């Protein structure tokens, strides 16, 4: 397998400048979920040029390219395409200045603040190398470009759009994500890797009144404040210290002026957990606390708790993860690691689930190694290293792209040609 990987990757230097151009173009032109028309067309056009059978418009903007190269396993590699409503602050010469009109009619900035432009570029590079070195492997390689990962509905949209009838059933599904680790780093993890995520919108009700007459009101602002404080005790006092979980209140909206007690307050929060037992416990605890605080405040009507976005946990299958980890160790040497549990979330696992196929998902680094090393020496990694979704998140072009292309290629070849 090592020989095959070197054979296929021998062409990486020759396409490096092309890939850098694709990456910078994608970074300049980010698109929000289910609006990735330009990105999807670029991926589809490139795949056709490489000889792939291409299907577009799956679930809206999803794309698959299939390359059949004799009898053998089917390997599917997935990249997500969408960007975020973030105003870029990287200072890069190819920084995004894109804006779109949001659903509410306001102008929104758009940025690839999570590295999906890296993912698309790396899968394009891998697909190109696999097409150019067909003598080195046997089987079928499927490149899948997924929309709307950030909204948690892109994988399901592709499935609902007939994905399983438009692509061959894979023997394994592969995916990766650029993370705030040093560029050149690759990290695998068997079992739980990314958390489940549940976003909730909670509305609590009071009775409005003049700000100078609180005795005539039931104040939902105070009610919401008490709920926010109490929610912090779920992780700290109801779960074991060895059980990872996160409860974050991201927004509270109530009232229109300083001298008016409103009649309701809206709380939006996010929960991260790694198994169904802790997930159920945390969600039940939130409901219990919200209802209890509403009753304690004499709320005139029950609270409303609505689940707005849900991501499944990403739990890597053991056998394919072990195979990829061994392949990475052979190819990357000391740069291959076991990665820590991550609190981010993904919807990618819905795709292999729909096919009934195993999968493995790993991380690659994207931070300048010298910058990261200095921050590590100073103990300031959390303060000095921008993370995904930050307006300052800017993966270095190299060796990030070469590492990502190499990781996808090495992982695919761990099946193809065996």
Image (cartoon, grey):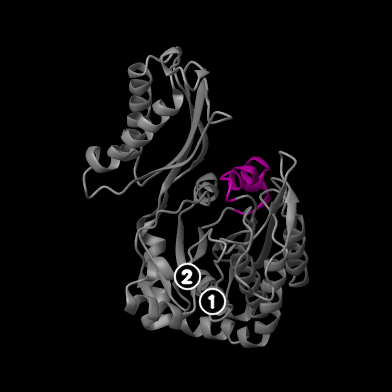
* Residue 248 place in picture, x, y as percent: 41, 44
The residue beneath circle 2 is 364
Asked whether the viewer can see residue 37, the reply is yes
Point out residue 46 in the picture as x, y percentages from the top left corner: 75, 69
Q: Nearer the viewer, residue 254 or 135?
A: 254
Q: Which residues are magenta?
A: 149-168
* Image quadrant in which you'd find residue 247: top left
Q: Is residue 227 left or right of residue 113?
A: left
Q: Outermost residue, front direction?
A: 212
Who's the residue at 49% across and 79% down the image? Answer: 368
Question: In what element is the residue under mark 1?
Answer: helix
In the displayed structure, 270 sits above or below 379; it is above
Q: Residues within 10 Å of mark 2 (few under 14, many from 20)?
A: many
Asked if labels 2 and 1 touch by Cβ distance under 8 angstroms, the answer is yes
Image location (x, y in percent) of residue 405: 57, 75
Does residue 181 appear left or right of residue 80 in this picture? left
Q: Residue at x 63, y 85 (%)?
A: 11
Q: CA distance from mark 1 to mark 2?
A: 8 Å
At mark 2, the secondary structure is strand
Q: Is residue 152 magenta?
A: yes
Q: Residues within 10 Å of mark 1 (few under 14, many from 20)?
A: many
Between residue 163 and residue 253, name the one nearer to us: 253
Would you place residue 116 above or below residue 221 in this image?
Answer: below
Mark number, residue 274: none
Mark before the other along the chain sequence, 1 or 2? 2
**Left or right of 278: which side holds 324?**
right
Q: Indicate whether residue 174 is drawn in magenta.
A: no
Instruction: Identify the residue under disc 1.
Output: 400
The location of residue 35, given as percent across then percent down, is: 72, 50
The relative height of residue 57 versus residue 10 in the rendered view (above or below) is above
- In the image, 309: left or right of 52? left
């Amino acid at each position: 397998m090592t020989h095959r990987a070197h054979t296929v990757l021998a062409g990486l230097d020759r396409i490096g400048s092309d890939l850098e151009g694709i990456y910078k173009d994608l970074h300049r032109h980010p698109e929000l979920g289910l609006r990735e028309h330009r990105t999807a067309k670029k991926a589809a056009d490139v795949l056709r040029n490489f000889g792939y059978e291409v299907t577009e418009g799956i679930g809206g903007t999803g794309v698959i390219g299939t390359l059949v190269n004799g009898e053998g396993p089917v390997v599917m590699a997935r990249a997500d395409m969408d960007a975020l409503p973030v105003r870029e602050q990287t200072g890069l010469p190819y920084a995004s200045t894109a804006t779109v009109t949001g659903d509410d009619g306001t102008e929104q900035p758009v940025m690839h603040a999570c590295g999906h432009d890296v993912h698309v570029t790396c899968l394009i590079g891998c697909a190109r190398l696999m097409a150019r070195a067909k003598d080195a492997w046997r089987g079928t390689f499927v490149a899948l470009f997924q929309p709307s990962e950030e909204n948690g509905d892109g994988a399901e949209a592709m499935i609902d759009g007939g994905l399983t009838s438009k692509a061959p059933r894979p023997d394994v599904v592969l995916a990766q994500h650029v993370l705030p680790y040093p560029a050149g780093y690759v990290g695998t993890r068997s079992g739980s890797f990314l958390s489940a995520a549940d976003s909730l919108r909670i509305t609590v009700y009071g009775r409005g009144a003049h700000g100078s007459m609180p005795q005539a009101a039931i104040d939902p602002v105070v009610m919401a404040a008490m709920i926010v404080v109490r929610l912090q005790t779920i992780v700290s006092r109801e779960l074991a210290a060895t059980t990872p979980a996160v409860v974050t209140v991201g927004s509270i909206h109530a009232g229109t002026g300083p001298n008016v007690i409103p009649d309701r307050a809206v709380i939006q929060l996010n929960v991260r957990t790694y198994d169904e037992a802790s997930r159920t416990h945390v969600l039940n605890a939130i409901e219990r606390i919200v209802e209890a605080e509403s009753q304690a405040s004499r709320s005139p009507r029950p609270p409303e708790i609505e689940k707005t976005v849900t991501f499944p946990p990403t739990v890597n299958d053991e056998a394919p993860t072990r195979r990829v980890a061994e392949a990475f160790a052979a190819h990357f040497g000391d740069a291959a690691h076991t990665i820590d549990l991550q609190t981010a979330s993904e919807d990618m696992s819905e795709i292999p689930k729909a096919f009934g196929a195993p999968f493995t998902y790993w991380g690659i680094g994207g931070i300048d190694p010298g910058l990261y090393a200095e921050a590590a020496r100073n103990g300031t990694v959390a303060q000095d290293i921008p993370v995904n979704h930050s307006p300052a998140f800017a993966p270095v072009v190299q060796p990030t792209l070469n590492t990502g292309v190499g990781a996808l290629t090495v992982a695919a070849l761990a099946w193809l040609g065996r």
